Image: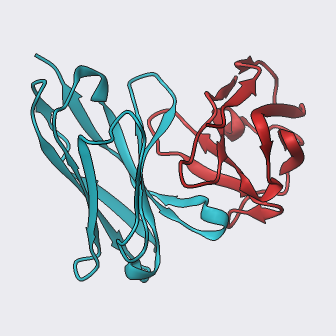
Chain colours: A cyan, B red
Amino acid sequence: DVQLLESGGDWLQPGGSLRLSCSGFGFTFKNYAITWVRQAPGKGLHWVSTITYSGVSTFYADSVKGRFTISRDNSKNTVYLQMSGLRVDDTATYYCAKLGDDDAFDVWGQGTLVTVSS
Amino acid sequence: EIVLTQSPGTLSLAPGERATLSCRASQTISTNQIGWYQQKAGQAPRLLTYGLSGRATGLPDRFSGSGSGTDFTLTIARLEPEDFAVYYCQHLDSKGTFGQGTRLE
């Protein structure tokens, strides 16, 4: 089975830092771009960041640029999202997804919850 | 930046009826750059259709995507009870912009 598994979600105060992980199983991880999408409680989906299969290129939403860093370790089949300067409005479930044909997000993880609150 | 606007916000239908969900882009986009997703409560989104004719593995025939230019549509031919969920369209580019969603109830 092709699967993605996120981890690292937590509760923390504004200004804090956190690293999320996304591990892939059942496919050749190093061949695929991986993306992060977040969903605030009761709200819609918002793209956060994408990293290409090799890790050479990265892309960020304006709302997280300069605060979040995406990276990957293909030897561990894992993508990371390092988040710093966290704000209350970063509170969300963070999903990672694999990019397939036409860059559609064809496999999703189950999500990990990040809560930023004082 | 392209903005996707979905309508209606909520669509109330009964099982067996036909559902038509709209997604309008603020600029012309390529047909192979639209994707549709379904999200049920408490679950991760699921890819439905994408590009010119792409379909997720195992997707029932009653789901179909169409459109061009700025107007795109997801049609569910005959609603089954499990189809009641929130649906999102997405621009399949480096920014992956989503529409705000349509709730099908």
Q: Position of residue A40 (x, y in %)?
A: 39, 27
* Residue at 40% over, 39% down: A38
Which residue is nearer to you in this view: B21 or B25? B25
Work out whether residue B82 or residue B92 is closer to the camera in this orientation and state it: B92
- Quadrant for the C terminus of chain B, please: top right
Image: A12 above or below A9: above
Residue closer to the observer: A71 or B77: A71
- List x then y, in percent, for residue A17: 11, 40
Q: Can residue B16 be seen from the camera position used here?
A: no
Determine whether A65 is above or below B17 in the image. below
Identified at 55% across, 37% down, the residue is B40
Tell whether B102 sits left or right of B32. Answer: left
Q: Answer with left or right where residue A27 lies relative to residue B63.
A: left
Question: Is B84 placed above or below A81 here?
Answer: above
Q: Is residue A55 left or right of residue A31?
A: left
Task: Using the rendered view, name the quadrant where residue A104 is placed.
Answer: bottom right
Residue A109 locus on image (x, y percent): 40, 55
Above or below: residue B4 compared with residue B8: below
Image quarter of the N terminus of chain B: top right
Instruction: Name the residue at 44% across, 35% down.
Output: B42
Count of labels in the image: 0
